[in-house]
Amino acid sequence: MTELELIQGCLQEDSRCQQELFRCYAGKMMAVCLRYARHRLEAEDILQDAFLKVFKHLDKFEFKGSFEGWIRRIVVNTALKHFNKKAFVNEQFGAELYPDIPVEPDAYDHLREEELMEMVASLPDGYRVVFNLYALEGYNHKEIAELLGIQESTSRSQLVKARKMLQVKLSATQKIAV
C-alpha cells in the first residue's frame, strides 16, 4: 500500500489503514518522544496524544513536503506542550560547575547511539529540551524561545550548559574506555 493510499484510507476512517499508518511511523516517532520525556511511560503518553492529533488533523496535510516530516512536527509540538504543562523552570546549575574539558575526537568511537541518547536524556529538563530542539530538530534560538515561552538568551544559556554537561559526561566515558 502506498503512502497516498494509506492516507486516503485513514481519511475514510479505515481502521486497517490507521493501524498500518501507526505501525509504519510509531517506532521513529517514539524515538523522538523519548528524547523529550523523562521516562518511557511519559514518552508513550506523548506518542499516543500525538497520533490522536495526526488522525484528527490528517485532512490538513497538504501533500507538500514529506508526510513523515509532518507527523514529526506534530510529535515534537505535542512533546513541547506536554513539557510546558509541567511548568517550565529554568535550571540553575551554573555553567561554572562544568569547566571546559577537552574531549578527544575518538571518544565518540567507544559510544553506541543508545549511550549518547542516554546522556542526552539524563540532562535536566530545560537543558534536554533546548538541546533536542537546537541540535537534533534544527530550530534556531528565536524559534525555541517562541515555542517554550522563554527569552532567546535563556535558550542560548540552556544550550551552553547542556553542552558543558555533555562534555563532562563524554570525558568521564572516555576515561573509562581508556
Image (cartoon, rainbow, N blue to C red):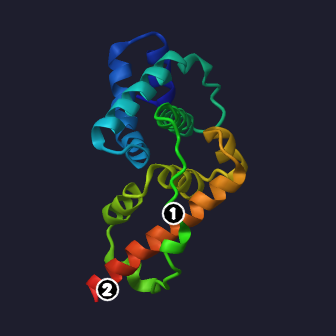
Q: Quadrant of residue 161?
A: bottom right
Q: Real-space Cα distance between discs 1 and 2?
A: 20 Å
Comes first in the chain, label 1 or label 2: 1
**Based on the displayed image, in which of its 4 quarters is residue 10 positioned?**
top left
Which of the image's four quarters has the C terminus?
bottom left
Q: Is residue 9 above or below residue 92?
A: above
Q: Nearer the viewer, residue 118 or 51?
A: 118
Q: Is residue 61 above or below residue 38?
A: above
Q: Which residue is mark 1?
A: 162
Residue that appears at 51% across and 63% down: 162
- Disc 1 is placed on an element classified as helix
SS class, disc 2: helix
Dot 2, crowdedness within 10 Å: few (<14), some or many (≥20)?
A: few
The amino acid marked with disc number 2 is Lys
Residue at 40 percent of width and 32 percent of height:
46
Q: Residue 152 location, x and y as percent?
A: 71, 51
Q: Residue at x 44, y 24 (%)?
A: 6
Q: Which residue is mark 2?
A: 175
The image shows residue 100, relative to residue 41, as above or below, that is below
Query: Quarter holding the N terminus?
Result: top left
Give the x, y percent position of residue 128. 47, 53
Q: What amino acid type is highlighted by mark number 1?
A: Ala
Locate residue 104, reporting x and y percent.
45, 86
Are the residues tagged 1 and 2 within 8 Å (C-beta)?
no
